[in-house]
């Protein structure tokens, strides 16, 4: 229900941009299931086979710099 409320809500963000935020949040929460599931949706919505993995990788790099 929460996912539908987020994804179907009108606004300026595309579905791909919303999924990118969810992938980043899932990565910050270390939820591998969510990263995989939303990463797959991000690849579909963005039509970019690497984008989900790139978001996860870049977030891990930022965590290393901050730590």
Image: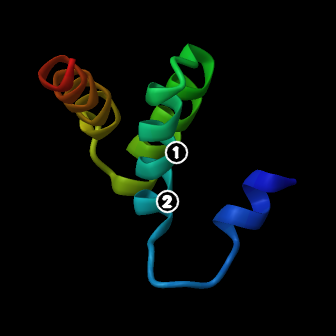
Pick the quarter of the image with the C terminus: top left
Query: Which quadrant would residue 13 be assigned to in this image?
Result: bottom left
* 3D distance between C-alphas at marks 1 and 2: 6 Å
Query: Which quadrant would residue 60 be assigned to in this image?
Result: top left
Query: Dot 1, crowdedness within 10 Å: few (<14), some or many (≥20)?
Result: some
Pick the quarter of the image with the N terminus: bottom right
Residue 24 versus residue 35 in the image, above or below: below
Q: Secondary structure at mark 2?
A: helix
- Residue 57's spot in the image, x, y percent? 23, 24
The extreme front residue here reads: 67
The residue drawn where x is 54% and y is 25% is 29
- Residue 24's spot in the image, x, y percent? 41, 39
Query: Dot 2, crowdedness within 10 Å: few (<14), some or many (≥20)?
Result: some
Query: Which quadrant would residue 56 be assigned to in this image?
Result: top left
Query: Toward the viewer: 14 or 66?
Result: 66
- Residue 30's spot in the image, x, y percent? 51, 17
| Residue holding disc 2 | 18
Query: Toward the viewer: 16 or 63?
Result: 63
| Residue holding disc 1 | 22
As drawn, is 16 to the left or to the right of 62?
right
The residue drawn where x is 45% and y is 50% is 21
Q: Secondary structure at mark 1?
A: helix
As drawn, is 2 to the left or to the right of 63?
right
Asked if marks 1 and 2 touch (Cβ < 8 Å), the reply is yes
As drawn, is 58 to the left or to the right of 49?
left
The residue drawn where x is 49% and y is 38% is 25
Q: How many marks on residues? A: 2
Query: Toward the viewer: 29 or 13?
Result: 29
The extreme bottom residue here reads: 11
Specify the label residue 5 is tagged with: none
Q: How is the image coloured?
A: rainbow
- Residue 43's spot in the image, x, y percent? 39, 42
């Amino acid at each position: 229900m929460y996912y539908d409320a987020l994804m179907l809500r009108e606004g300026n963000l595309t579905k791909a941009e919303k999924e990118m935020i969810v992938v980043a949040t899932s990565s910050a929460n270390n939820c591998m299931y969510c990263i995989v599931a939303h990463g797959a949706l991000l690849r579909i919505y963005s039509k970019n086979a690497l984008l989900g993995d790139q978001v996860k990788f870049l977030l891990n790099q930022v965590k290393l710099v901050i730590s």
